[in-house]
Every structure is written in structure tokens, then in C-alpha cells.
Amino acid sequence: MTAPRVRFAPSPTGSLHVGGARTALYNWLFARRHGGTFILRIEDTDVERSRKELTEQILDAMTWLGLSWDEGPFFQSERQDLYREAAGRLLATGKAYRAFETPEELDAMKKAAEAAGSAFRYDGRARAIPAEESERRAAAGEKFVLRLRVPDEPLVVDDVVQGKTEFPAGALDDFVLVRSDGHPLYHFTVCVDDVAMGITHVIRGVDHLPNAPKHVALFHALDAPAPVFAHLGMILGTDGKKLSKRHGAAGVEEFEAQGFLPEALDNFLALLGWSPGDDRERMSLAEMVALFSLERLGASPSRFDHEKLAWMNGQYLQEIPVERLVALLKPFPLPAASEDVLLGAIHLHRSRARTLAELARSLAIYGADPVTFDEAGLKKFGKPGTASLVRELAGRLSAAVPFAHAALEEAARALAAEKGVKLGELAQPARLALTGVLASPPLFEMIEVMGRETTERRLLAFADRIAGS
RNA sequence: GCCGCGUUCGUCUAGCGGUUAGGACGCCGCCCUCUCAAGGCGGAGAUCACGAGUUCAAAUCUCGUACGCGGUACCA
């Protein structure tokens, strides 16, 4: 295939939704797979709803996801001349025409159609206005919109995902290209830009599928070949409704804030509507680039499963370099502990967390001493009689040389053997003393990281506490 | 209403005329074990939405129905 040119064209009317992120990802993968060009275009023609800071947020999210663009970002708001020129050309060649109906008149027509039980379609009555009259009325300052003269012929949308669908002649009405205030509309700017940018493949959500015939008609009018379309199935929430904030998180930056890794989100999102064909699921961007093809995209909608994303994130948490983990953890609240302790702790806890936020939270025990203790644990391992055992353990551990997990464990096992108790009967109270809970990484490795002083202090404090109760 | 799209374990999916319908998440059990994870092993879980056709043979092809989703703007 000759090098394709694709684009991702978000509107800065909200943050980058995961659905949009997936669209961007597929476009990016396709471009990279075939040595093509990935263009970023900001569709900010809706002046009322577009916001500058949202553009920044979208760009940041793209960068965070690792989706680098080759050209742009282009802003439609800065390309008005291009649209005006194209509109003039369509008008001059008769492919578009001025329509002078006021919004009120149109409204009345809509109401009438509704009353008659049929859908409103503009009847093209302004087509008949002679060119001179049209010029004269425009020059006289009469308001008008520009409408496309949709040819009376069937329109074919060739879609790699949805198949070829043919829209019969007359399915489309002469839709508006340019508003009466001179602002070009979405369908028009999209096509003008796609032509100007030499877009060869349009990969976007199915919500745009009904627009496709309009675009095909426009490409014809602009004397350009229609690009290849690929309309993706929607991403829904777990309840089958369109994914939104209601479902927990929908914006890419929210996932970042919750401690998901970009590679995990990329990987997860890629699998929502695409698969490499074999059973593999864990893939880096590079692997996905090598495997990607439009033909393997799915048309059916998919639900966003937070559980699976969390699992996948946990997988990545386990395998990325620890230095990177340290860097990624920076934005999260971490305990006041030395770099060494933190590093050791991360090693012990990374396989036990599914998000960076969880990981950071689990590291808290390396900071302040626990003040509350698991109730069930206290009931089971906090009997007064255990206090002396815990004190003795503290002494043995403090005396261990070196203060490393092997020696620590040996010391503890020796004590357990002397007392005729199982290791667990020693380890569990100790774990409770050290962490306040009954679940943690292996005790002795944790003790090694916490250090002699902390261990002894917590063990003795705990012994005092339960002895008195 | 009209137009379009979709429908394989709870979820994500493989499958593209002949399979014991495969994998993953989640769930359950076992192993490992000082606890919890991770990991290993195993299990439950899908009359392939439903109904007609075509065919020796259909999850796979055709049509219809149901349900879901999307669109129906001088929004994107």
C-alpha cells in the first residue's frame, strides 16, 4: 500500500474520552504499520463550545499515551480562508447554492413535516433561484446559507469494518455547508480538510457512519476521491450505555490520575474492538504496530471492563523497570522514608497492587507506625499471652546478623521451635504489629526493608498494647 | 417515526461451511506458603439473540423478527 495519511480530529469540547483515545490509537497504529503519516487536527469550529485549555489537555493525553503525531496540530479555526475559498468554488460551479429561508421558515417546514408524520428534509426549493437573482439578493445583504446540491444518484460508502452500504438516491437532502453568519459547518470543514491534507483513510467511531454519505457526496463535489472508511464500534459502560463519567472514569487524564500506566491503557483499549488474530493479549505499542490491520477491527460495540484494565495494569506494574516506577509514583502521596527503604518496599509491593495509587497507599506502612489494628487480627493474635512472645521475637530479630531476611527468618524459626509453636503463630502477630493488618509481603523481607529500629519499636509497642488489654 | 449499524461464556474476544466452539478478565478449587498477592495447575460458565431458508453439513451464507446502539441541526 502506498503510504497512507490518516488523521485524528477531536473537538476541544471535552477531555480526551477513552473512545477518542482508542480512535487515535488505531489511526496511529495504522499509520505506523504502513509507514504513513498521522495528522492531528483540532476541530474547533463550534465557537460556543470549544475551549482552548481542552486542546492542551487533549494534546497532553495523546503524548502521555505515546501517540506522536507527524503533522499538526492544525486548528480549523485558523483555516477559515480555505473553507471560504472552497465554498466560493462550489458556488461558482453550481455544486452548491444559496438558500434564503430564515430559521423561522425552516422551523415551520419542520413542524409541517412532523404534523404530516414524515421526517423533515429540505426540499431544495432554492435550487431554482437564478444565479443573478441569488447574487443580487446576497449583495443586498439578505441572509443565506450555502447548501450542497446533492446529485440525484445513489451514494456508496465503502467501509472496511461495516462493509459496503449503498444509500439510495434521494436519501440525503441538500444539507447546509455554511451558516448564515458565514461559519462553515462540520461536514464541510471535515471534507475540505481531508482533501487538503490528502487523507486516504478515515478511521472513526460508528456514530459518524450516518454522516459518511454526506461526506462522500462532498468529496465528489470537491472533485476528490473518497477516502477508505473504517467505522469503529462504540465503547459502552458496563451497563451498556454510552461510556461517561458516570461509569467511574471516561477521560484519559482520569485514568492517569488513578494510577494507570499508558502502556496498559493502550493495550487494553486496543483490544476493545481489535485483536491480532491469535490468543495474545499483552502487547507493547511496537508489537501492536507490527500486527495491526484494519481488516481485524470489529464492528460490534464493546463494554469497558474496569476489572480487566486493572488486571492488565497490574501486569505492567510488575514488569516495568523499578526506576520508572519510582518516577511514576512521584505524583502520589508517599511516606517519609529513605530512598533505599522506598525502593525495597516497591520491590515487595509492586506485584500486590493494580494501580500506582494502590501501590503508593500500600507503601504507607514504611512511614508512620500503625495506630489502628485490624480488629479480627487483634482478636486472634492480640491476646495478652502473646506479648512476651512478641517481645522475645523483637530481641531475636534485633540480634540477627546480618539484618537480612534469611538470617531474620532463621532467628524467628529458631524461636518458634524453642517455644513449640508454628511459625505462623509468631509471624501473624508480628505482621499485625508491623503493619496493622494481616496481609502483607513476606514478613522477613519486609522487616529487612523496614530496618532494625522500626521493627523493634513497633514490635515492643504492640506487645505493650496487648499486654495491657 | 424514518434511516443506519450491531448481536459467540457475566465481560473482552478467536472463529470467516465440517472445531469436544479456543483464549483472556472475573469467579471457584488445588499447589506454593509466615499472611496477602504474584505464579503454576484444574474447574464451572456460550441451546453462538430468536425464527425461517440455502446446503449432505450453518456460529459461519440469505431473509425476517426481537432487543440494543447511533443518526435524524444554520452541534461536532
Image: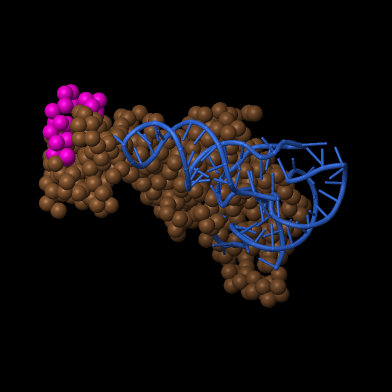
Chain colours: A brown, B blue
Q: Quadrant of residue A61?
A: top left
Q: Is the magenta region chiefly helix, strand or loop?
A: helix
* Left/right of residue A295 with respect to residue A443 in the rendered view: right
Query: Residue sitting at 19 percent across and 46 percent down?
Result: A370
State the extent of the magenta-drawn residues as a range: A389-410
Task: From the top left corner, tell me how far across and down residue A248 is, in percent.
Answer: 42, 54
Question: Is the residue A320 above or below the residue A23 in the image?
Answer: above
Q: Quadrant of residue A134?
A: bottom right
Query: Residue sitting at 16 percent across and 48 percent down?
Result: A384
Query: Residue sitting at 63 percent across and 51 percent down?
Result: A209
The N terminus of chain A is located in which quarter?
top right
Q: Toward the viewer: A102 or A266?
A: A266
Q: Is residue A195 visible?
A: no
* Left/right of residue A434 with respect to residue A155 in the rendered view: left
Query: Residue sitting at 14 percent across and 53 percent down?
Result: A469
Figure label count: 0
Task: From the top left corner, tell me how far across and down residue A52 is, in percent.
Answer: 39, 50
Question: Is the residue A201 above or below the residue A134 in the image?
Answer: above
Q: Quadrant of residue A328?
A: top left
* Left/right of residue B8 with respect to residue A420 in the rendered view: right
Q: Toward the viewer: A110 or A131?
A: A110
Q: Toward the viewer: A413 or A406?
A: A413
Farthest-out residue, front? A420
Judge whether residue A407 is colored magenta: yes
Judge whether residue A331 is colored magenta: no
